[in-house]
Image: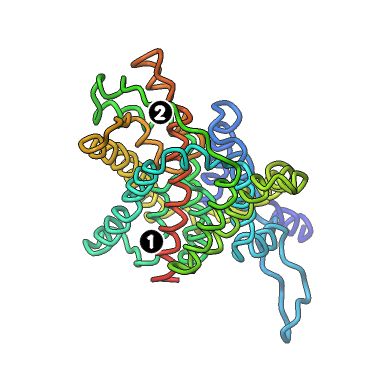
Amino acid sequence: MEKLIGLWQSTGLFQMDPGQPIMIAIGFFLLYLAIRKGFEPLLLLPIGFGAILVNIPGAGLMDAPLMQAGHAIAPGGFLYYVYHVGISTGAFPLIIFMGVGAMTDFGPLLANPKTLFLGAAAQFGIFATVLGAVGISAMGWIDFSIADAAAIGIIGGADGPTAIFVASRLAPELLGAIAVAAYSYMALVPIIQPPIIRLLTSHEERCIEMVQLRHVSRTEKIIFPLSLLALVAILLPAATPLLGMFTLGNLMRESGVVDRLSDTAQNALINTVTIFLGIGVGSKMSAEHFLNIKTLGILALGIVAFGIGTATGILMAKLMNKVAKHKVNPLIGSAGVSAVPMAARVSNRMGLEANPHNFLLMHAMGPNVAGVIGSAVAAGVMLAFLG
């Protein structure tokens, strides 16, 4: 009889807490969004699966190693090591940033440098959300520290790796909610942005055709990442890890002498790391860490941050048109958030809806790439003050 009782007590059904079935259901919902809806599947699929694994009672996948006299006498769970080796150290987001850099073409930004202002303006959503989180805490609704607020605000940059990197430094206990919010809203760009764009622009503005971009030489493309890195290292060293890896990847692409390394960074390496990053993020979605009022606050603040970033990019484009000789289509301002290349595609699609001859994709890639730089700089500011 004792053996039967022991067997029953070892089952997952006996050990299950009330919140674990809810989190497992959320994991399956993320899988549904990835597989059925195609929402950011490269990350939502492993994140969802990681959430399922970490909430299976008794599996011990996130257990810390058992220590005695400073030595491990029993190993920890697999997800424990994935998280602490790749995410807690910041290694996975940095490697992904290198891969993103290797896939990035700075040509549209260099051909029309004023679009850098659009990417910068879109980062206002980050700082506005930080103030919002501090305000919510001051009113006693949800207890967010200033470090929590900074980590949440980065969601407004629509840059998943940057959000994970900052959260792992400033608010590791909120990492799961922040990562899920960041990638979910990135995946929902085609749904979130159009209503904001239509609200802030007229049909005539959406019809504006932009002049052909000039050709950008290979020399310019090589000098730019090196100059960017030097500037960041001098003025904002805290942003160097993110922008350093980003510019390394881009230099491998543009130099033309390490094609094998560039190809690896763009494909095999970034794909491998994405798998472990996803399940590592999912490992922070255990019921005790995720099911609380803070998670709801993060999801609400995240969508506000994203909306403000989209709006301020559009408004900056409208302001530039007051003084610019060549008009800027305000649609490309919405691409200032760094959801590459989805935000640029939304700008292009809405431009074609208004004017069948209005091809904005390459124009929108300028502020889109600027948004990647802007979100990394904003992250560096947060880490410099709070890290």
> Is 329 situated above or below 136?
above
Q: Residue furthest bottom?
A: 69
- The label on residue 254 is none
**Residue 156 on image: x %, y %:** 39, 48
Query: How has the structure been colored for display?
Result: rainbow
Q: Please give the name of the residue rendered at 79% of the width and 59% of the height, measured from the top-left corner.
A: 3
Residue 84 is left or right of residue 176, and the answer is right
Residue 334 visible in this rendered orientation of the protein:
yes
> How packed is label 1: few (under 14 Cα within 10 Å), some, or many (20 or more)?
many
The quarter of the rendered structure image containing the C terminus is: bottom left
Residue to which mark 2 is pinned? 347
Q: Please give the name of the residue rendered at 32% of the width and 47% of the height, measured from the top-left corner.
A: 121
- Determine which quarter of the picture holds residue 259: top right
**Residue 79 on image: x %, y %:** 68, 57
Q: Earlier in the sequence, mark 1 or mark 2?
A: 1
Q: Please give the name of the residue rendered at 47% of the width and 28% of the height, measured from the top-left corner.
A: 361
Q: Please give the name of the residue rendered at 71% of the width and 71% of the height, measured from the top-left corner.
A: 65
**Residue 41 on image: x %, y %:** 60, 35
Residue to which mark 1 is pinned? 150
Instruction: Select label 1 or label 2 by which is in front.
Output: 2
What distance separates the C-alpha of mark 1 from that of mark 2? 28 Å
> How packed is label 2: few (under 14 Cα within 10 Å), some, or many (20 or more)?
many
* Residue type highlighted by circle 1: Ala
Nearer the observer, 309 or 301: 309
> Is 142 situated above or below 337?
below
Q: Secondary structure at mark 2?
A: helix
> Is 21 situated above or below 333?
below
The quarter of the rendered structure image containing the N terminus is: bottom right
* Residue type highlighted by circle 2: Ser
**Residue 277 on image: x %, y %:** 63, 51
Residue 152 is left or right of residue 216, and the answer is left
Q: Secondary structure at mark 1?
A: helix
